[in-house]
Amino acid sequence: MILFSFIYIFLKRYSRSIFLFQNVLNFFIALLIFIRKFSFNIVLMDLFGVHLILDEISMYFILLNAIVFLGISLKGVEDETLIFLLSTTSFSLNLLFLSYDLFNLYVMIELVSLLTFLLIVHGRKISQYWAALKYIILGSLGMNLYLVGVAIVYRSNYSFSIQDVKNIPTIALSLMLTGVMIRSGVFLFSMWLPQAHAEAETVVSAVLSGVVVKTGVYTLLRLATFSKSEHIVSYFGAVSAVLGVIFAFLSDDYKKILSYHTLSQVGIILSSFKTAPLYSLAHGVFKSWLFLLKDDLPTRKVSEIKRLNFDTWIFLILASLSISGLPGTSGYIKSLVLKNVPFISKILLEVAFVGTCASFAKFFFIKVGKSKNRMTFHHIFLLTVSTILGILFFDIKYVFSSILIFSAGIFIHLAMYGRFNVRKIALEELEVSLSMIIILTVVISWLMFLQQ
């Protein structure tokens, strides 16, 4: 990271080429690690007590990070400062996805949070400053709760090891879970997300939704492995999947639709910890792709888009099919999620899947114009990755149900589109979010005590 920082400082004029080279290299290294299943487990106990691990969970998140950032660099980023911030964020995310102790996770999440704040405000718009301020206030509150929980863990075990969370007081685990869920993009916990993701610049939105929210998901996966709290988090995830998709369906702002869907999709991810790393990868591909398509649209207001050139329309349709979970796309991996959830969660997720299809059905009815033959290397790359994932994890047993869910979504769109519209919900207000966090902390603590 330090080496590349100096390179960017002294070779500013070549920053775009360096950024592309860096991400191509990062992608092939991540792909090699994923294919060859490289692993390590390092404890730097004598130095800083830092525990780093490369295992099957880390591999998925590191590959996800590499894919999203390569897609962004293929699209092209002109601003030198933005390139430097994105490059530093990419390195920091890789290190976070290798972290395996409670305190190092805290440090890396806070570092990524600071970089995220700088990325959101980069456009220097008033709306971006407010979105970033709300993000940093609520995020800091969440990580302070987490840090208090970590302090209790250390006081109990004199260790920051994640494996020791199974022997800690219930209140400590409750505080850590609440703090991380605020960062994860779970509905009610993370109501800073819609505005932050919608107001940021396009490439920043792609990074935030594609990778940054996965920092909380990754931490929850590590915590839940030893704390036996999976089912509590998974039920919150299933509820988030439904609530997020409802507000996405009712929104007419393209980036708000995608932002609410991030809340929904994170809920789907957390509904099944067994498939969470894999579906995180799939989500990062199609969601970053959808955000990058925003620059090709004439306006963010979907109802005002009457015609698109063929290049934009076809990629928008393919990306919409991917998030809808059609066979042959990365979103089809949602079928594997349903195999690993209890009955109640399965019903909620199927409702969310239908709602997702209904949200994106509107794009199928936009008129198509002539092709403009634009350079679309990033679209082709993300389409290729989505298709490969769809083929690798294809299961013919779920083809009929996927088509049935998609058809139900089309029907709901035709029956209800345009009848309702929500611009903003009260839950996004800062004071309401703070109140909800206090209530949810109590709720999670109560559920954890009931579990004992």
Image: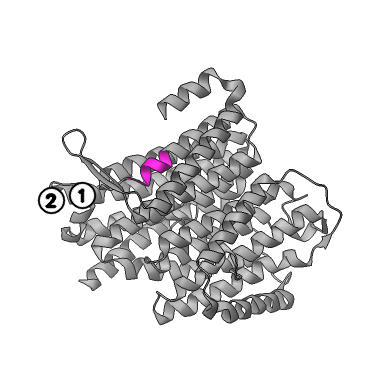
Task: Give residue 340's position: percent from left, percent from top.
Answer: 40, 74
Is 446 on the left or on the right of 269, as rendered? Answer: left
Please identify the residue farthest to the top as the structure is shown: 10
Task: Give residue 421's position: percent from left, percent from top.
Answer: 68, 65
Q: Which mark is residue 157?
A: 2
Other residues around mark 1 within 10 Å, as few (<14) / some (14–19) / many (≥20): some
Tell me the distance, in whole angstroms, between the alpha carbons under discs 2 and 1.
9 Å
Quadrant where the C terminus sits is bottom left
Task: Give residue 186's position: percent from left, percent from top.
Answer: 45, 60
Instruction: Specify the amino acid type for callout 2.
Output: Asn
Asked whether residue 215 is in view, the answer is no
Q: Is residue 361 above or below residue 179?
A: below
Is 339 on the left or on the right of 75, as rendered? Answer: left
Is 351 on the left or on the right of 108, as rendered? Answer: right
What residue lies at 13% left-to-right and 52% top-to-bottom? 156
Most prominent secondary structure in the magenta stretch? helix
Task: Give residue 274's position: percent from left, percent from top.
Answer: 37, 66
Which segment did they paint magenta?
A: 92-98
Quadrant where the N terminus sits is top left
Instruction: Give the secondary structure at mark 2.
Output: helix
Other residues around mark 2 within 10 Å, as few (<14) / some (14–19) / many (≥20): some
Q: Nearer the viewer, mark 2 or mark 1?
A: 1
Instruction: Give the secondary structure at mark 1.
Output: loop
What residue lies at 75% left-to-right and 51% top-to-bottom? 297
Contact? badges 2 and 1 (CB < 8 Å)? yes
96 is within the stretch colored magenta: yes
Please identify the residue farthest to the front as the structure is shown: 36
Residue hosting label 1: 161
6 is within the stretch colored magenta: no
What residue lies at 33% left-to-right and 40% top-to-bottom? 107
Of residue 190 and residue 225, the one placed in the foreground of this image is 225
